[in-house]
Image: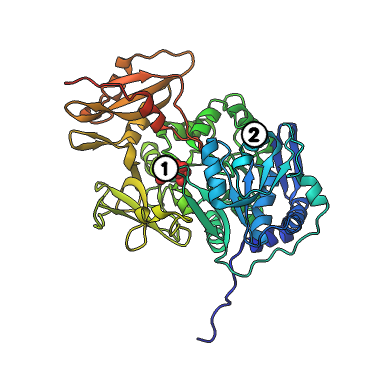
Amino acid sequence: MDGLMQDYPLTVPMMFRRAERLFGAKKIVSATHSGLERTTLSAWAERVRRLGGALEDLGLSSDARVGTFAWNSARHLECYFAVPGTGRVLHTLNVRLFADQLVYIANHAQDEVIFVDRSLLALLWPLMPELKSVRHVVVMDDGAGEIPDDPRVLDYEELLAGAEPADLRVADEDRAAAMCYTSGTTGHPKGVVYSHRSTVLHSMCALMVDSLGISESDVVLPVVPMFHANAWGLAHAGVFAGSSFVFPGPDLSPAAIARLIEQERVTFAAGVPTIWMGVLAEADHHDLTSLRCIPCGGSAVPKALSEGFREKVGVPLLQAWGMTETHPIASVARVSSERAGRGEEELAEVRATQGIMVPGIELRIVEPGTEEELPWDGRSRGELQAVGPWVARDYYDDPRSGESFTSDGWLRTGDVATISPDGYIHLVDRTKDLIKSGGEWISSVALENELMAHPKVAEAAVIAVPHERWQERPLACVVVKAGETLTREEVLSFLDGRVAKWWIPDDVAFIDEVPKTSTGKFSKKELRDRFAGHRAGSD
Ligand code: ADP
């Protein structure tokens, strides 16, 4: 019909051009092995265009997959915009994956070139004989590491210096812009492909005040790696908004993060709970009060951790839930106006939920194994399922896609949740981490939350161990804070009254550290393997 709006494509270059036009003076700081590198957004934007030209000079296919194997940096952000800006597909490789998974992923995506930090080249180079499609390795100098003498190895700065700035434009918003593989706790990783349209819409959502609310006035520190679900969208959304950036580079130690926040007056910093556990301990030695928003997710955010930030830094953590398959932001735990004004304890409970679905995403819970949607009554537990313009519809070239989507097209998340009448999601567990005891389910997440509230507990993970009578019983794996001591009885009596009696673990294993996955989450799989022979009592 006449009078309609323009059919204007939502593309990554559109976001880039806005920042280039308006916010050239903004700072971009990158920590490297040889110190801090500072640049402005206008200098960065000029390099993005040159990188676009360099991609043409490399003779890549028009829809080439361009791999990155890099820490968070301004150069990595150049790849984020130049690659999709020339119609190619940015493929961020997780630098912490095992060699065989990396080989599988790069071959599966058919990466033609990989942009790699010099300090990470030693990890990538030995895999080259097995990387079938990779023709060039472009080295970005982050201040450390050997460079092999080989014609396939190119220097990033030389490429840029010799290239003409490109006119970054993409006509079709449904074109692939980027891809990312889920870490895959079982089987091979699965590839998720983001379109230009989904990237723009997800970025717009990240800018909404009731979601992450990234602003032009923010100094954004993505601690979450740019190889993990697009740094939760911060890299794109921060550019779109016109924020300044601080990139942490290779050193993700709590002291380094705290120093960056303090020195650069960071206002917006996002990372997984394990990162913030470390940084909280630094709050006594560093001024972290410039922070106004601290998004946290990837695994359940312990209430005690969030409250620790509220008390010491002045702002609690902002819990978000999502997956690689959802770009990833799907829900955010802001306190609604209806719940605001209640006591601190109740507000802390709200913030310990996975929040409410962000505008644009629809969620539901479904009785496992059926198609029956469950009520939002805060009690009924079901599998969380998602649809929306930034939710994957299948996996890249993968026969397993069918298992993960319902017949009516919803993404099956593999998470079990309840939803309150006003929409707050409470994630009970990942399906595979639930503990099945005597025909009932015990939530490992809830137990961990309580254990980590103990003042002497640094970290705690709960896994199922086999039990003769009850099938499975919980085993608490506890890391005691440095300099403290704790007994099994003290741990168990702490839980008494905090959780149902039959949830109390049969045993406590004191360990030095909870093993982590490549994305910094507790690796329950590794713990289950380690304690496979552990038998809980038989009564
Ligand atoms: P993987 O962990 O398999 O690498 P993702 O990084 O995409 O994959 O993680 C998605 C999963 O992380 C979700 O399905 C959920 O189990 C978990 N997760 C993400 N955010 C939260 C949160 N706020 N609370 C609890 N679990 C979360």
Q: Earlier in the sequence, mark 1 or mark 2?
A: 1
Q: Amino acid at mark 2?
A: Pro
Specify the quadrant that holds the C terminus. Answer: top left
Q: Secondary structure at mark 1?
A: loop
Q: Amino acid at mark 1?
A: Gly
Q: Nearer the viewer, residue 277 or 229?
A: 229
Identify the residue position indicated by label 2 in the image. Answer: 250
Q: Nearer the viewer, residue 54 or 355?
A: 54
Q: Report the image quarter containing ligand 1.
A: top left
* Label 1 C-beta lies within 8 Å of the nearest ligand 1 atom: no
> For residue 452, what is the image quadrant?
top left
**Dot 1: few (<14), some (14–19), or many (≥20) neighbours within 10 Å?**
few
Identify the residue position indicated by label 1 in the image. Answer: 187
**Dot 2: few (<14), some (14–19), or many (≥20) neighbours within 10 Å?**
many
Q: Nearer the viewer, residue 511 or 303?
A: 511
Whether residue 421 is visible to the viewer of this picture, yes or no, is: yes
Residue 394's spot in the image, x, y percent?
A: 43, 58
